[in-house]
């Protein structure tokens, strides 16, 4: 029988808050209930926002909560070669192209498209890529990259979906029952796989890491549920195993909004400084 393997994967771009505590505690509780393991992953691909002091604070906060994990800790910044190899495998299938518009130019293109009616948005509300970079010749793309121009590597979603065929994922609910969910990766358009300044993306890194760490159960916030469609697509294209997913409810602030790392009132460091105990944190997140 396969040992269940869970993971908690924070980004060191700020201090942990109650939402992180809920996810970490829930992963550990579920692993214990099923005699499984918990791994820790540091998602630090964003070199401009991730800082060593935030990473140190993650370890401090998790230890204060009484949580432990199996070593070694996986840091994404140490595995860019693995992510690059995955993108190269997709490129070899003819599924990757470079686009060269800046964010401001993309916004301008969206405004122009919307003159003729609403432009489609992804599940997070961001406009789908509106450019025509897919029409560039390979020689022209190579010339612009060689010239040092900023670029994003994008997944040709239509071609990727056609190659992969219909996809689903397994979703476990709070009672432990597993249902089949239909994946709709096309809703995300031609997602970014990497940029010139960041040789990977959340989507690529998470599927490569889950496979490398042997993750059987991904337990994360409901805000990432729709992105699972992209992850299932990449898993299929890269012949990677698909974990069982559980997307838990979010801890919201007094205005009903998702917690932010900038909200000190719900930060674990601030709560601890005001005298909160780990038992208080469990009570506050409903565990």
Image: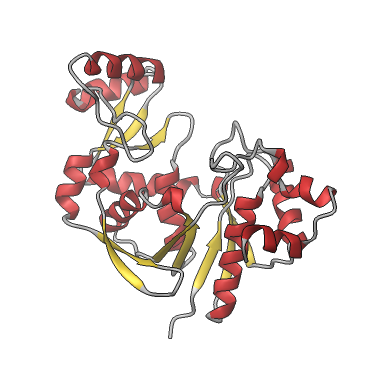
Q: Position of residue 213 (x, y in %)?
A: 49, 64
- Total numbered badges shown on the rendered structure: 0
Q: Position of residue 163 (x, y in %)?
A: 16, 51
Please determine whether, in this image, residue 58 is positioned above or below residue 46: below
Between residue 22 and residue 240, name the one nearer to us.
Answer: 22
Image quadrant where one finds the C terminus: bottom right
Q: For the view shown, which residue lies furthest in the bottom direction?
A: 1
- At 73% from the left and 50% from the top, the residue drawn is 268
Lateral position of residue 138 relative to residue 218, left or right: left
- At 25% from the left and 61% from the top, the residue drawn is 168
Please determine whether, in this image, residue 74 is positioned above or below residue 259: below
Between residue 197 and residue 59, name the one nearer to us.
Answer: 59
Q: Position of residue 256 (x, y in %)?
A: 54, 42
Q: Quadrant of residue 63?
A: bottom right
Between residue 283 and residue 136, name the one nearer to us.
Answer: 283
Q: Position of residue 204 (x, y in %)?
A: 40, 47
Image quadrant where one finds the N terminus: bottom left
Please determine whether, in this image, residue 122 is positioned above or below residue 6: above
Between residue 123 and residue 164, name the one nearer to us.
Answer: 123
Q: Quadrant of residue 68?
A: bottom right
Asked if residue 73 can be seen in this view, the reply is: no
């Amino acid at each position: 029988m396969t040992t269940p393997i869970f993971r908690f994967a924070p980004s060191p771009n700020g201090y942990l808050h109650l939402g992180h505590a809920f996810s970490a505690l829930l992963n550990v509780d579920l692993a214990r209930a099923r005699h499984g393991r918990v791994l820790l992953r540091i998602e630090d691909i964003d070199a401009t926002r991730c800082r060593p002091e935030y990473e140190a604070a993650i370890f401090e906060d998790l230890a204060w909560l009484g949580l432990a994990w199996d070593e070694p800790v996986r840091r994404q910044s140490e595995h860019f070669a693995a992510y690059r190899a995955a993108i190269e495998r997709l490129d070899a299938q003819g599924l990757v192209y470079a686009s060269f518009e800046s964010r401001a130019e993309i916004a301008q293109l969206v405004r122009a498209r919307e003159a003729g009616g609403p432009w489609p948005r992804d599940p997070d509300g961001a406009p789908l890529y509106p450019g025509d970079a897919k029409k560039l010749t390979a020689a022209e793309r190579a010339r612009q990259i060689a010239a040092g121009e900023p670029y994003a590597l994008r997944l040709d979603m239509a071609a990727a979906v056609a190659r992969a065929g219909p996809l689903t994922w397994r979703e476990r609910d709070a009672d432990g029952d597993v249902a089949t969910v239909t994946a709709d990766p096309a809703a995300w358009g031609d997602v970014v796989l990497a940029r010139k300044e960041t040789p990977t993306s959340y989507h690529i890194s998470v599927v490569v890491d889950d496979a490398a760490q042997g993750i059987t159960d991904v337990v994360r916030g409901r805000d990432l549920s729709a992105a699972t469609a992209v992850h299932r697509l990449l898993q299929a294209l890269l012949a990677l195993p698909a974990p069982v997913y559980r997307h838990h409810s979010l801890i919201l602030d007094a205005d009903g909004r998702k917690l932010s790392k900038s909200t000190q009132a719900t930060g674990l460091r601030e709560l601890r400084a005001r005298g909160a105990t780990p038992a208080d944190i469990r009570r506050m997140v409903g565990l």
